[in-house]
Image: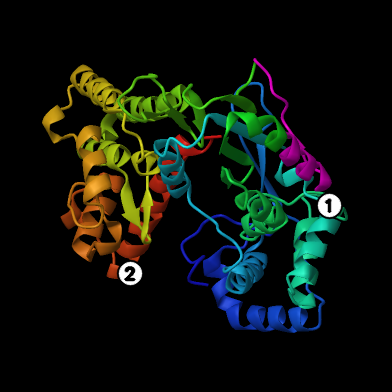
Amino acid sequence: MSNFALTKVTGIDNIQPKHFCKTQSKELNTIVYKVFFEEYKFTRYKEKLISKGANKFPRQIAIPTLRDRIVLKALNTYLQKNLSNLLSIQVPQQATRDVKTALNSNQYQTVIKIDIKDFYPTIDHTILVNKLIDLNIEKEAISLIKDAISTTFTKNHKNKIGIPQGLSISNILAEIYMLDIDNEFGDYDIFYKRYVDDVLIFCHKSDSKNIYSKFRNKIEELKLETHEESSLSDKTIIKNINENFSYLGYVYNPYNNNTGVNISIRDSSKKRFQDSIAALFTSYMNSGKKRSKALLLWKLNLRITGCIANKKCKGWLFFFSEIDDMKMLFELDYMIRKLCNRHHVEYKNIKKLTRAIHEIKHNKWNNNYFPNFDSYNYEKMKDIVAYDKGIPPHKLKLSDQDIANAFWSIINREVKSMETDISSFS
C-alpha cells in the first residue's frame, strides 16, 4: 500500500487509498483467496486520453482500481524477479549514451530507424501467452495476465488484441513480446537498440537493405507492422550515419560539423519546454491578490533544474541530460531572462540551465543547485506548503504528518506537471 498511499488517481470505483485502508486487511485477504483459487477478475479500467498533438489520435491510458493496482504491482514484481536476467530494460538516457558510444566508434556507415506502428494496441495475446509459457511463468500468473490484458474500458466486453497502456505490467509484457527479436539482432555484427516501439540500427552500408528486410519480416511474424519509409516522415529511415537523424527526442548531427557528435533535441521538445515556462509567468500575472513571487520563483527554478524525488531524477533537463548543445541552453536562459524583465521579476534569483546541465553531468548526487526532496526536513516541507497556500510559514497550523502529506502532494503535482514537457519524445 505504501506505493499508492499518496496518489489521488482512482479507478472506475473512485476508491482512494485513505478509504481503502479502512478495510485493507479484508481486501488483501480477498485478493489472496481469489488469486489462489484462480477466481480473481479485474474491474474494467477508467479511460484517460493523452494528447499526442494535432492530427494524431490521443494515447489511451488505462487506470485500474486500487485493488487491481495492488495485484498488478505484485505481478510486475514477480515477472521482474523471474526474468531480470533475460530482459534488458533501459531508461532513455542510458539508451542515448549507448547510441553516442556507437557513433563515436566510427564503425558504421548507415543508420536505420524503424518505428513499429500501434505497438501496444496490436500485440497478439496468443503469441504473448505462448512466450510466457516458454519462459516457465506459472499458470496462476499467466491466468492473471490474460485477464488483465483482456479487460477493457467497457462493461461486459473483453479485449482480444493489444495490451492496455498504463498498467504496471504493460512495459515488461511488451519487452517479453520482443525478446526473441532483440536477442537475434543483438547477436548480429551491428549496433541494435530498441526502446518500446522505436528501433535504431547502425550497420555497414552493404548490409543495410538486408537487415531492414529481415527486421520487417520478423516483426510481421509477431503480427506487428512498421511504418514505411517516406520522405514526408522520419519515423522509418535508412540514411548515411553522418546525416541528421533523431531518436528518443534527441537530434544527432544537428549541425553536421567535424567537431565530434553533436546532440541536441527536437524543436517540438524545445517548444514544449518554452511553453511551460511561459505558462508559469501567465499564471503568476493572472493570480491577482493571491500573486506570490516566492511561489513563482520556486516553480520556475524547479522547472529549470528538475529535482530528485522518491530516489528518481525528474524534469526536462534530467531527461535530456545527454545533450551537448550549449548554444540552445544559452538561448533558453536568455528567453527566461527576458520573461523575468517583462514581468518585473529579479533575474538574479533564477537558476540557469547552462549551470544545471553541468551539475547534472558531473555532480548529480552531491550538490545544492537542484532540490533533493527526499532529504527535506519538516521545516523545509513547511516552507513549501506555506508558499503553495500563499500564507507565511508561521501561520501554518498543521501537524508534522499533515505537512508531510501536503508537501508530497505538492511535489507529485509539480513532477506530474514537469513530465508533460517530455510526454511525447518519439
Specify the segment rendered in magenta: 213-231
Q: Which comes sooner in the sequence, label 1 or label 2?
A: 1
> Residue 401 — which label?
2
Location of residue 211 by image quarter: top right
The residue nearer to you, when weighing 237 against 156, is 237
Q: How many numbered badges does the structure rendering display? A: 2
Q: Is residue 286 visible?
A: no
Dot 2: few (<14), some (14–19), or many (≥20) neighbours within 10 Å? few
Position of the C terminus by quadrant: top right
Task: Reply yes or no: does residue 225 show up in magenta.
Answer: yes
In 3D space, how far apart are the residues under numbered discs 1 and 2 (Cα atoms)? 43 Å
Task: Reply yes or no: does residue 329 show up in magenta.
Answer: no
Q: x, y (%) of residue 175?
A: 65, 55
Q: Residue furthest front?
A: 206
> Mark 1 near mark 2, Cβ–Cβ under 8 Å?
no
Q: Name the residue type under label 1.
A: Asn
The residue nearer to you, when weighing 186 against 315, is 186
Q: Secondary structure at mark 1?
A: loop
For label 1, the residue is: 159
Instruction: Please say if 288 is above or below 80.
Output: above
Q: Tell me, what colour scheme is on the image?
A: rainbow
Q: x, y (%) of residue 160?
A: 86, 52
Q: x, y (%) of residue 54?
A: 61, 22
Q: Secondary structure at mark 2?
A: helix
Q: Is residue 260 left or right of residue 149?
A: left
Location of residue 103 by image quarter: top left
Q: Is residue 405 visible?
A: yes
Q: Name the residue type under label 2.
A: Gln
Q: Residue furthest left?
A: 348
Q: x, y (%) of residue 108?
A: 51, 34
Q: Nearer the viewer, mark 1 or mark 2?
A: 1
